[in-house]
Amino acid sequence: MHSLDGKKIVVASHNEGKLREFADLMGPFGFEARSAKEYGLPEPDETGTTFEENAYIKALAAAKATGLPALSDDSGLCVDALDGAPGVYTANWAETPDGSRDFGMAIQRT
């Protein structure tokens, strides 16, 4: 278990908006949120079959790499009309050939 004595927590994300959200939540308690991107960490493969498993994979990788406490989340679209799809595969579902994400395109082809 990692100590919270240093008041620094790694947010296992490269998303600047996500970092701001966590920083806003933790800041009033004296904690400093630092992103995985700030530490130069690669994004681990999200091989879980649930959002919880993928969040765990990301947080564990960041904690092991930095020696600091880490947290993460995972989310996606779960559409009843698509039997819960795309779910944990939302990012892959919207991926374009150049590796970017286009959710409008993904919706049109569904």
Image (cartoon, rainbow, N blue to C red):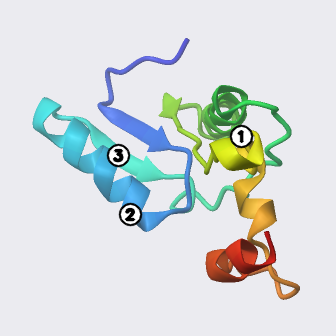
Residue at image point 24% right, 37% down: 26
Work out whether mark 1 precedes mark 3 in sequence or the reverse, and give the earlier one. Answer: 3
Where 61 sits versus 69, above or below? below
Identify the element where label 3 is drawn.
Answer: strand
Q: Amino acid at mark 3?
A: Ala
Relative placement, left or right, of 105 versus 47 is left
Picture disc at residue 33: 3
Work out whether mark 2 precedes mark 1 in sequence or the reverse, and give the earlier one. Answer: 2
User: What distance separates the C-alpha of mark 2 from that of mark 3?
Assistant: 12 Å
Relative placement, left or right, of 63 versus 69 is right
Q: Amino acid at mark 2?
A: Gly
Relative placement, left or right, of 98 versus 59 is right
Identify the element where label 1 is drawn.
Answer: loop
Q: Which residue is mark 1?
A: 84
Q: Between label 2 and label 3, give the one nearer the viewer.
A: 2
User: What distance separates the C-alpha of mark 1 from that of mark 3?
Assistant: 32 Å
Q: Position of residue 84 (x, y in %)?
A: 71, 40
Identify the element where label 2 is drawn.
Answer: helix
Q: Position of residue 43 (x, y in %)?
A: 72, 55
Q: Amino acid at mark 1?
A: Gly
Q: Quadrant of residue 39?
A: bottom right
- Tell me the crowding category of disc 1: few under 14, some 14 to 19, or many 20 or more residues within 10 angstroms, Cα based: few
Q: Position of residue 80 (x, y in %)?
A: 65, 42
Q: Position of residue 17 (x, y in %)?
A: 38, 63
Q: In the depicted view, which residue is nearer to us: 91 or 45?
A: 91
Q: Are marks 2 and 1 in contact (CB under 8 Å)?
A: no
Q: Which residue is mark 2?
A: 17
Quadrant into which the C terminus falls:
bottom right
User: What distance separates the C-alpha of mark 2 from that of mark 1?
Assistant: 26 Å
Where 69 sits versus 8, above or below? above
Q: Between label 2 and label 1, give the one nearer the viewer.
A: 1
